[in-house]
Amino acid sequence: MSERISRRAAIRGTVTAAGAAGVAAAMGAAAPAHAEDEPGDAKVTPPKGAYARNVEVVGYCDLDERPGFKMAIRHKAGRWYLYMGHFWDPGWSVIDVTDPAGARVLRFLPTPEPRTNTLGNQVTLGGDFLVTAVEKVFPADLAPDPDGPFHDGVLIWDVSEPADPRRIAHWRTDGGTGTHRNLYDGGRYAHLAANMKGFTGNIYVILDMADPAKPREAGRWWVPGQEKGGEQSQDTSHLHGFCCGSGAHVSLHGPPYPVGDHVYLPYGAAGLIVLDISDVTRPRQIGHLPFSPPFHAQFGVHGFLPVPERGIGFANSEDISYGKGPAHHASIVDIKDPANPFLLSLLPEPVPPKGAPYKDFYSRGGWCGPHNFNHHQYHPDVEKQGDLFYLAHFNAGLRVYDVANTRLPREVGYFIPPEPRKRYGPLPAGNLVVQTEDVVVDRRGLIYITDKNQGLWILRYVGPR
């Protein structure tokens, strides 16, 4: 991945104070593609080529032609800042979204040199500190020089001046390939999905942030069998069976999600794992819920969001088979007893809107299935998880679900952006189609979504609650 895998342009949105009307005017206004599904639905007019139900567009930013990936939101001194990692240009941007119709990039922070083989696309934010992940480009066929140098670990930034992040530390993974999806809530510890020397796949690492300028490892845990050539664990409480091999499908995607003395680990083919971290130096497994089989193995559990006050959690996989492999899932899990989680229900599979030129999303092209949800529940500026669940669903765009009845979740809204006009990077292979990557919802109710080959869409749910 070079300084810029591609500088080819994607959609440039022109947004005025008219909000959604400005976007529609810039991209060519059209009649609602799928405005009403049920009585009580709001009337919305999506931009030309888009489909929407109960979701309106309020802003668009082309991100200076750097497609976005993961995001974190912050409100300070009357202004709203979005921190964003990028796909094809490794680094992070600070975006002023105070006025969503006039969102603008304030600053771009490239990964350290040399940048050729380094990914810089992940962010997590707590208090005045931003933690960004750096890792070796994967898969290898996307790296311009697979054997070349790269940066690994996490970079820690002081964001007490929100528009002007200042890097204060670089913690490294001791000969590993770096970290992927991490979580830092502003407290004593950061929780990392890290590839460390001597291990296959990512393991769980607890980072002591007592002095953010000098972070240090406090503890670690891994699925037995991830050790390269190491002795197998004799822990008889370990329950994973066949999926404890050393293959990369057993890998902590992250983020590890702590709740009190417990942490929930979305561990790929190893399923959902629950640890007791009352002693951070000796994490101990207490619970496990397998998902693979029947669902696909690689990224079989990609993310997990515990909502302890309701005794539930949300799980999902990530399907990168272009719809050719076993089924993906987005699920609701009972976690009233963290030692014995069990499946409550599956979220409904998206159905193409009326008039769409594809019969299902599996055959549409690109990656299909769920990817990320509004998971920053530890941050005060994020909309708290209630009866609406927001999910980025690759080629099905943003999906919104009513999860008041955890046994019978139902879809109540969606937004499928127009197709990208030009390609920035090599993904998705084949047809260039929408690939909605991440979603964050702030406490104003504004929804932010990113795409592999577009800019930032800013939306609002306007349907019944």
Image (tube, rainbow, N blue to C red):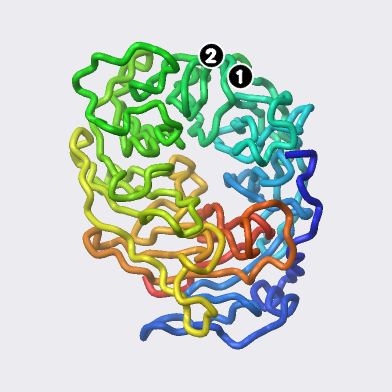
Which residue is under mark 1? Answer: 171
Q: Position of residue 458 (x, y in %)?
A: 61, 62
Q: Position of residue 254 (x, y in %)?
A: 45, 36
Q: Nearer the viewer, residue 364 or 216?
A: 364
Evaluate whether residue 417 shows in this view: yes
Marks 1 and 2 in Cβ contact (< 8 Å): yes
Instruction: Identify the image quadrant of residue 290.
Output: top left
- Quadrant in which the C terminus is drawn: bottom left
Q: Is residue 111 left or right of residue 458?
A: right
Secondary structure state at the residue bearing disc 2: strand
Compared to residue 363, the image places residue 70 above or below, namely above
Q: Residue at x 56, y 54 (%)?
A: 437
Q: Residue at x 27, y 25 (%)?
A: 285
Q: Nearer the viewer, residue 425 or 43?
A: 425
Tell which circle, 1 or 2, labels the residue nearer the N-terminal end.
1
Q: Is residue 338 left or right of residue 323?
A: left
Q: Amino acid at mark 1?
A: Trp
Q: Residue at x 68, y 83 (%)?
A: 29
Q: Residue at x 64, y 45 (%)?
A: 84
Compared to residue 64, the image places residue 72 above or below, namely above
Evaluate whether residue 187 shows in this view: no
Dot 2: within a 10 Å radius of its alpha carbon, few (fewer than 14), some, or many (20 or more) residues? some
Q: CA distance from mark 1 to mark 2?
A: 8 Å
Secondary structure state at the residue bearing disc 1: strand
Which residue is under mark 2? Answer: 216
Dot 1: within a 10 Å radius of its alpha carbon, few (fewer than 14), some, or many (20 or more) residues? some
Total labels drawn: 2
Instruction: Identify the image quadrant of residue 76.
Output: top right
Q: Is residue 114 left or right of residue 378?
A: right
Residue at the bottom extreme, as displayed: 31
